Image (spheres, rainbow, N blue to C red):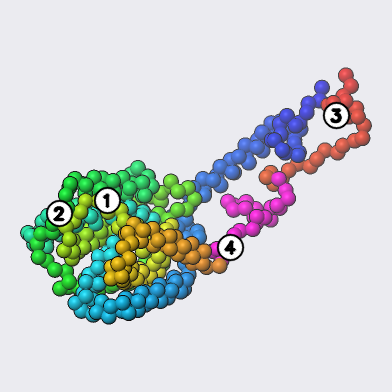
């Protein structure tokens, strides 16, 4: 009795082979080839994975930074028209100190974003450093500042190792750290009056100049191709749970330690500048402001991409706006301001991601292009089945009694 060769076909395959053993061997070879192609894609070199979406177009960042500069200039004009003394000393010194503190928070947020490990704990760290200085400022600036920096750096190191060892998302690990720091911040029931007499306004130009230099020099360094790719190795490519080996260890640790240290320094400056007591809270508003300003300045939410002057201009704009709202009695909550900045930052990220790539990298691959993985492109045709060398169809006859269904016994 003749057998039906469709028994040995794959579902949907229009042709088969009369020899079942030959068919099984062919299927095994096809499956092995597919598995090897998958293995090659999973074990691709680090450099190729990091660059698979192409180089960046910095002109888009510079164009966006012109918009930020114009916005900062408009806010400066509004502040000057409201109170010309606001942009003159001694009021100018207070503006510069506030800008330096906000700038350090933004630098920390931007550093963690560039490395693909957004640090959600920077706001609570700022508040914890404020309490540290408020309670120990009478001992001198160094005894109050150094412990805050050491604890912040140690916390960043621990969180970084947690991310690297457990392969967990950075936002989840830093959020857990943020909740822990919030618990520390809320151990105080009452507000804490600031001790000590260190005045950051005496070094206003030095503090703001230091922030501006760090922002611009860091951005220029981050625009260098190898450095940009080195810090952007955690940028999502393929499976977001994948990690790129030992190459990501240093960027992750540097980003989280650096961002935590910047946040602690900002908290000390804010506490030393204010005459009001430090009140218990969460500090998460500073997380929103820092990350929002970094995004608004052109740093991509996906990591790696960033501009040159965007962080500086965004910080200047917010500093001017905060002083303007105080003088006009607008009374806008920091959380509301953080939300608005964050929304604008997401728009900036979409602009950077959409237009920040070269055209050759941004264009999608045609559906009928020859497949990768070492297959012979000469034998590829989009209309042919997955098995490149499909056997020829056996000739059919018009007789009903030919074949297995009409076979005579």
Q: Report, in whole angstroms, how far the alpha carbon at label 4 lies from the one at label 1.
A: 44 Å
* Nearest the eye: 41 or 112: 112
Question: Which structural element holds mark 3?
Answer: loop
Going from the N terminus, do you reach mark 4 or mark 1 first?
A: 1
Going from the N terminus, do you reach mark 2 or mark 3 first?
A: 2
Instruction: Name the dominant secondary structure of the magenta segment.
Output: loop
Can I make out residue 299 in this image? no
- For residue 363, the mark is 4
Q: Report, in whole angstroms, how far the alpha carbon at label 1 lies from the one at label 3.
A: 80 Å
Name the residue at 75% across, 36% down: 16
Nearer the camera: disc 4 or disc 1? 1
* Nearest the eye: 251 or 16: 251
Residue 237 point in image, percent of width and height:
47, 53
Is 366 covered by the magenta stretch? yes
Going from the N terminus, do you reach mark 4 or mark 2 first?
A: 2
The C terminus: image quadrant: top right
The N terminus: image quadrant: top right
Residue lying at the far top in this picture: please name it: 409
- For residue 403, the mark is 3
- Density class for disc 3 (Cα within 10 Å; few <14, some 14-19, many ≥20) is some
Residue highlighted by disc 1: 282
Nearer the camera: disc 1 or disc 3? 1
> What residue span does the magenta drawing correspond to?
360-385
Going from the N terminus, do you reach mark 1 or mark 2 first?
A: 2
């Amino acid at each position: 009795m003749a057998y039906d060769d469709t028994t040995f076909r794959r579902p949907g395959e229009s042709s088969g082979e009369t020899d079942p053993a030959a068919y099984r061997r062919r299927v095994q070879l096809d499956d092995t080839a597919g598995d090897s192609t998958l293995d090659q894609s999973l074990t691709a070199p680090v450099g190729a994975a990091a660059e698979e979406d192409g180089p960046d177009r910095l002109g888009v960042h510079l164009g966006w930074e012109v918009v930020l500069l114009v916005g900062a200039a408009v806010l400066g004009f509004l502040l000057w028209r409201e109170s010309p003394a606001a942009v003159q000393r001694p009021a100018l010194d207070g503006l510069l100190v506030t800008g330096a503190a906000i700038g350090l928070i933004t630098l920390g947020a931007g550093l963690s974003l560039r490395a693909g490990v957004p640090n959600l704990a920077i706001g609570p760290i700022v508040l914890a450093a404020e309490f540290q200085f408020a309670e120990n400022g009478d001992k001198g600036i160094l005894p109050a500042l150094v412990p805050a920096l050491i604890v912040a750096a140690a916390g960043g190191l621990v969180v970084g190792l947690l991310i690297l060892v457990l392969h967990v998302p950075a936002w989840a690990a830093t959020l857990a750290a943020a909740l822990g720091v919030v618990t520390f911040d809320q151990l105080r029931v009452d507000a804490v009056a600031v001790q000590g007499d260190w005045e950051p306004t005496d070094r206003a130009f030095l503090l703001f100049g230091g922030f501006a230099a760090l922002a611009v020099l860091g951005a220029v360094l981050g625009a260098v191709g190898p450095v940009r790719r080195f810090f952007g190795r955690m940028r999502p490519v393929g499976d977001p749970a994948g990690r790129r080996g030992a190459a990501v260890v240093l960027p992750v640790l540097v980003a989280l330690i650096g961002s935590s240290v910047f946040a602690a320094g900002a908290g000390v400056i804010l506490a030393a500048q204010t005459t009001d007591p430090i009140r218990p809270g969460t500090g998460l508003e500073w997380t929103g402001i820092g990350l929002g300003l970094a995004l608004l300045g052109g740093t991509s939410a996906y990591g790696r991409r960033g501009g040159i002057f965007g962080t500086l201009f965004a910080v200047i704009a917010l500093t001017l706006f905060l002083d303007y709202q105080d003088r006009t009695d607008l009374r806008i909550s920091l959380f509301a301001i953080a939300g608005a900045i964050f929304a604008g930052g997401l728009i900036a990220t979409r602009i950077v991601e959409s237009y920040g790539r070269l055209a050759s990298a941004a264009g999608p691959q045609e559906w009928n292009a020859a497949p990768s993985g070492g297959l012979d492109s000469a034998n590829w045709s989009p209309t042919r089945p997955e098995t490149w060398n499909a056997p020829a169809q056996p000739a059919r006859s018009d007789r009903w009694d030919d074949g297995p269904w009409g076979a005579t016994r």
